Amino acid sequence: MVYQSFLIKYAEIGTKGKNRYLFEDALIKQIKNALKKVEGSFIASKESGRIYVQALSEYDYDEVIDALKKVFGIAWICPMLQLEDKDYENLKKVVVDYIDQVYPDKHFTFKVDSRRADKNYPVRSEQMNCDFGEVILNAFPETSVDVHHPDVLVHVEIRKVVNIYSLMIPGPGGMPVGTNGKATLLLSGGIDSPVAGYMIAKRGVKIDAVYFHAPPYTSDRAKQKVVDLAKLVARYSGPIPLHVVNFTDIQLYIYEQCPHEELTIIMRRYMMKIAEEIAKKSDSLALITGESIGQVASQTVQSLAATNEVCTMPVFRPLIGFDKQEIIDISEKIGTFETSIQPFEDCCTIFVAKHPVTKPNLNIIHKSETKLEEKIDEMVRTALETEEVIWCD
Ligand code: ATP
Ligand code: MG
């Protein structure tokens, strides 16, 4: 079966009332962006409150479905047969032919759902349901009708053209990227943060990312892994500018001046501070991390509170209540897992103490941080001034 077009069904956008058109337009824009990477020529358009994708040239079906499955805001992708010839007798033949091609195994129950948007069409929809049902039953006696729970629901719509579809391929859901502002993701090379970025982008949020690099303690290969992960997330979120911040001097300074068991917490506080500065400059309104309660010493509730204290922006932690296995399941689904588990050093683990504090006391942390006063502001400024931005698409 060669489909010339796809009906795109959206979910939550439907509840947006007067603003709905803004969400529809954003969805069309994201669909166009996604299809730019697919060979062939397509148009995505809105017509009578519905979104269609039309192929204007030959294309690879799997590639198109794969691209559309990554566009947030799409609930269902319905490949459609479209024909201009509305002749009723011919239509019956086309419906039978459609069923024959799409369902090689005819052991299924079905129901026909006809719609007559073109009210001038001479046959009423109830009549069409009966007639199309009858021709299908006659052509394929193995099938049967089930009007309550059919295996196959055959849609026949008489509009400007005739649309026939029955397949519904699930999209990723969520909201179109660009409908909900921008947030800055703290992206490490681990399993969690790419998933966190995916989840927030899924709610329509544009993503910027920050990676803290600590050469020579972390290698170029470790940095490349983060770039690769940003590119994988960008398949869903659209292009991500990745800010690479050189964190080595700050890390070494904290290591020299502060108690080693507090190192991770103090380091994470500076990561958040710097990320927030970068976020402000790029009009981001929030930070995103891959933290989850209790996963490691720096993610106990006390540690999270200590890290959070330095932030004035909201910090989104979409994985906060997830178990590791639940996070892994999502990372496998979105295709970041294999890259995340490549064994490259992480700047957090290099200086990690044997017994990091798990219940940091903020007064003690504040006191330790006074030991950084001499140089830290200058170091933070340098880190911000020397950031490298890599576009990941
Ligand atoms: P991940 O799997 O995302 O690396 P993790 O389990 O290793 O997380 P931590 O190392 O404690 O946990 O980091 C917690 C969060 O802090 C990460 O999810 C990420 O958002 C951020 N983070 C950690 N290291 C870096 C880094 N080098 N650059 C940017 N963000 C980082
Ligand atoms: Mg990590």
Image (cartoon, rainbow, N blue to C red):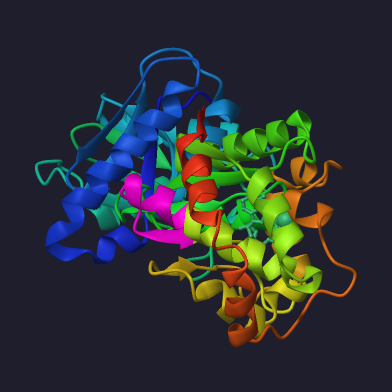
Q: Nearer the viewer, residue 18 or 370?
A: 370
Question: In percent of the image, x 41 and y 24: which residue is there?
Answer: 4
Residue 380 painted magenta: no
Q: Residue furthest right?
A: 354
Which picture quadrant has residue 296? bottom right
- Residue 113 location in percent, x, y? 37, 55
Q: Nearer the viewer, residue 374 or 184?
A: 374
Q: Quick check: can you spot residue 173?
A: no
Which quadrant of the rendered structure holds the N terminus? top right
Question: In percent of the image, x 25 and y 33: which residue is there?
Answer: 45
Q: Nearer the viewer, residue 13 or 93?
A: 13
- Left or right of 207, for residue 121: left
- Residue 331 location in percent, x, y? 69, 53
Q: Nearer the viewer, residue 345 or 267?
A: 267
Question: In percent of the image, x 15 and y 41: which residue is there?
Answer: 121
State whether residue 100 is above or below residue 137.
above
Question: In percent of the image, x 69 and y 74: which residue is there?
Answer: 299
Which picture quadrant has residue 301? bottom right
Ligand 1 shows up in the quarter that is bottom right
- Left or right of 164, for residue 45: left
State whether residue 129 is above or below residue 371.
above
- Left or right of 5, for residue 1: right
- Residue 258 location in percent, x, y? 72, 67
- Left or right of 119, for residue 157: right
State whether residue 37 is above or below residue 48.
above
Q: Quick check: can you spot residue 307?
A: yes
Q: Residue furthest left?
A: 120
State whether residue 349 is above or below residue 361.
above
Q: For the magenta stretch, what is the residue range? A: 275-287
- Residue 52 location in percent, x, y? 31, 36
Q: Residue furthest front?
A: 374
